[in-house]
Amino acid sequence: MTDFEIRRATAEDIPAIVALLADDPLGARRESPDDPAPYRAAFARLDQDPNQHLVVAVRGGRTVGTLQLTVVPGLSRRGATRSIIEAVRIHADERGNGLGTQLIEWAVEESRRQGCALVQLTTDVTRLDAHRFYERLGFEASHIGFKLPLGG
């Protein structure tokens, strides 16, 4: 299915993106769609950073998917630039029809275009379907991730 457009997100997309982020068991606990202020502030920071690529997939005027691609220059791996895929969400009505695959393929191709040598992502340990999805796309579960909440 390719009857959708992937484009850079705009401020007008914030409510739809937040709704996608909140529409799962983990996101429902983390997100606050009724308070748009922190999302607007975060969007303003993202929109000013050329290494941040917040995109939406739109079909028929409706936002059906999103992800954030971050390009990270580095010294390791002989000065390689890498990209990080974050906050991948597909609308519940659209899951299972190939949109997620095409969105990730877009991110991988954009990473190549940006000169990245490596694409990485994390997913919650409880998201077993997501693990299978990423492995099917060629990603390897090669590392263990750690988080330290800083409050606030």
Image: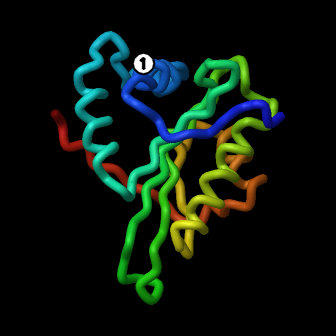
Q: Position of residue 107 (x, y in %)?
A: 60, 53
In depth, the one of 79 and 112 nearer the eye is 112
Q: Is residue 12 left or right of residue 58?
A: left
Looking at the rendered structure, the number of numbered marks drawn on it comes to 1
In depth, the one of 10 and 38 nearer the eye is 10
- Pointer 1 residue: 15
In depth, the one of 89 and 66 nearer the eye is 66
Which residue occupies the extreme bottom position in the image? 78
Q: Position of residue 32 (x, y in %)?
A: 34, 17
Q: Position of residue 99 (x, y in %)?
A: 73, 36
Disc 1 is placed on an element classified as: helix
Q: Is residue 9 left or right of residue 111?
A: left
Q: Position of residue 102 (x, y in %)?
A: 73, 44
Q: Residue at x 59, y 23 (%)?
A: 63
Quadrant for the C terminus in the image = top left
Q: Is residue 140 left or right of residue 96?
A: left
Where is residue 95, by image quadrant? top right
- Asked if residue 126 shows in the view, the reply is no
Q: Residue at x 26, y 43 (%)?
A: 45
Amino acid at circle 1: Pro
Disc 1 residue crowd, few under 14, some 14–19, many 20+, Cα 10 Å: some
Q: Residue at x 23, y 32 (%)?
A: 41
Which residue occupies the extreme left position in the image? 152
Where is residue 138, by image quadrant? bottom right
Quadrant for the N terminus in the image = top right
- Asked if residue 33 shows in the view, the reply is yes
